[in-house]
Image: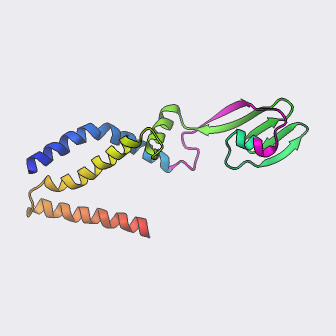
Amino acid sequence: MNNKMRMYHRYLGFFLSGIMAVYAISGIILIFRDTDFLKRENTIETQLPANLPNEEVGKSLKFREFVVEREEGTVVYFKTGTYDRSTGLAKHTVKQLPYAIDKMTKLHKANSGSRFFYLNIFFGLGLLFFVVSAFWMFIPNTPIFRKGLYFALGGLILSLLLIFF
């Protein structure tokens, strides 16, 4: 049993190493999602119907929080751009991660409606298998196994402390 677990652990580890690298990098980047770290400013021009009410401008641009700061003539100013009522042209700036990093973070944040749904479940189950199979890597009742149990208990306690306190 020990040799089989070690073999499964080894080959699943090799297989998932690329996915783990992507999750690790995107996870670190997501820590800074509330800042402008690595983000670039892009200007977007969208043609909307002319003479839209302010609420419809926000909905059309898919803004969660749309607040008009001021209006001058036919131009409506909001936090990230403008909307010209006479032409219907909306110009606004967004801060986006570079293309590849943006795709990696979307994989990391995928939910049940995403096309990455099954990959995330497989990856989670793979990590759970690593947790369990790690205890078959060493013979029980040996000093290294007992030491490993202490480290595992320490990691569990640290995680619980960080979660609840």
* Residue 71 forms part of the magenta stretch: no
In the rendered image, residue 38, in percent from the top left (x then y), is placed at 54, 39
Given the current orientation, which residue lies at the most extreme bottom position? Answer: 165
* Residue 36 forms part of the magenta stretch: yes
- Tell which of 122 and 164 is nearer to you: 122
Compared to 54, does 163 lie above or below?
below
Q: Quadrant of residue 165?
A: bottom left
Compared to 116, does 160 lie above or below?
below
Which residue is painted at 76% across and 49% down in the image?
67
Which residue is painted at 48% across and 44% down in the image?
113
Q: Is residue 30 left or right of residue 122?
A: right
Tell me how the rendering is colored. Answer: rainbow
User: Across the whole image, how many numbered discs are drawn on residues?
Assistant: 0
In the rendered image, residue 112, in percent from the top left (x then y), is placed at 45, 46
- Tell which of 116 and 164 is nearer to you: 116
Q: Is residue 142 left or right of residue 43?
A: left
Which residue is painted at 44% across and 40% down in the image?
107
Segment tinted magenta in the rendering = 32-56
Q: Is residue 135 left or right of residue 74?
A: left
Which residue is painted at 44% across and 44% down in the image?
108
Q: Is residue 120 left or right of residue 153?
A: right
Given the current orientation, which residue lies at the most extreme right position? Answer: 73
Compared to 98, does 5 lie above or below?
below
In the rendered image, residue 39, in percent from the top left (x then y), is placed at 57, 39
In the rendered image, residue 29, in percent from the top left (x then y), is placed at 47, 45
